[in-house]
Image (tube, rainbow, N blue to C red):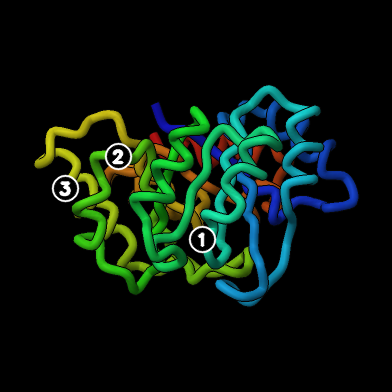
Amino acid sequence: MIKIAPSILSADFARLADGVAEAEAAGADWIHVDVMDGHFVPNITIGPPVVAALRKVTDLPLDVHLMIAAPERYVDAFADAGADILTVHQEATTHLHRTVQAIKHRAIRAGVSLNPATPAHTLGEILPYLDLVLVMSVNPGFGGQSFVPTSTAKIARIRRMLADGGIHDVEVQVDGGIGPDTAGEVTAAGATVLVAGAAVFGGVGTVAENITAIRTAAR
């Protein structure tokens, strides 16, 4: 089943709880939380206290995407805050296997993300240890960017790598420029989780209408 994970990066930060409630009522599967440090990416967003606050207002899985340098320093903080999934960037940590193991040690799901210019084949050694692979279909740091077209082929390559390795329980997530116009092609390529921010919280319809439009296109 295709999962929709609205990104609160595009929600109204003055009423985050309301935005999450709207998304949950509209049938969202996960809530995607983008954490940025102003170093690994050129923007600063939120930290563990906001994740802890969101944990109090939703039972949906909190899908926390750490776009930060040396994310291993904050695994425990975000796990304690209530993250259900922690995704780190391959480009941001020197000892990726160790970082993934630290996440798994906290009994939460572990993901690894790739920037648009990072080749899919660099995941080869870490794939057996993952619960999720996140393909960035924009350069990370800001919401509302346009989809990078080569992302579709990268999703398909990762899906083939998983199949060739006999790995069948890893989600392939895509984040960036996802909306009704791109949902179909990325799910056809093998994506199972769609992160959408601007298309959900800033689309032409209500949050419910926008999620429905993305899910319909994904089918």
Residue 47, visible in the rendered structure = yes
Side (left or right) of 46 relative to 119? right
The answer to which image quadrant residue 84 occupies is: top right
What is the distance, in whole Å, between disc 1 and disc 3 at their CAs? 24 Å
Q: Which of marks 1 and 3 is in front?
A: 3
Q: Which residue bears the numbered disc 1?
A: 177
Examine the rendered structure and indicate whether residue 105 appears above or below residue 124.
Answer: above
Is 123 situated left or right of 45 in this image? left
Which residue is at the front of the view, 45 or 79? 79
Q: Nearer the viewer, residue 209 or 195?
A: 195
Q: Residue furthest left?
A: 164
Q: What residue type is labelled 1?
A: Gly
> In front of the other: label 2 or label 1?
2
Q: What residue type is labelled 2?
A: Tyr
* Amino acid type, mark 3: Met
Residue 195 location, x and y as percent?
53, 47
Q: Residue 129 carries which label?
A: 2
Residue visible at 38% across and 50% down in the picture: 98
Report the residue at 70% width, 48% height from top. Answer: 8
Tell me, for residue 139, which label it has, or none: none
Helix, strand or loop status at disc 1: loop
Can you tell which mark lies on residue 161?
A: 3
Callouts 3 and 2 close, C-beta under 8 Å? no
Q: Where is residue 175 in the image (x, y as percent from the top left)?
A: 48, 54
Q: Quadrant of the C terminus?
A: top left
User: Foreground mark, 3 or 2?
Assistant: 2
- Gap in angstroms between the C-alphas marked 3 and 2: 14 Å
- Kindly state the secondary structure of the residue where label 3 is placed: helix
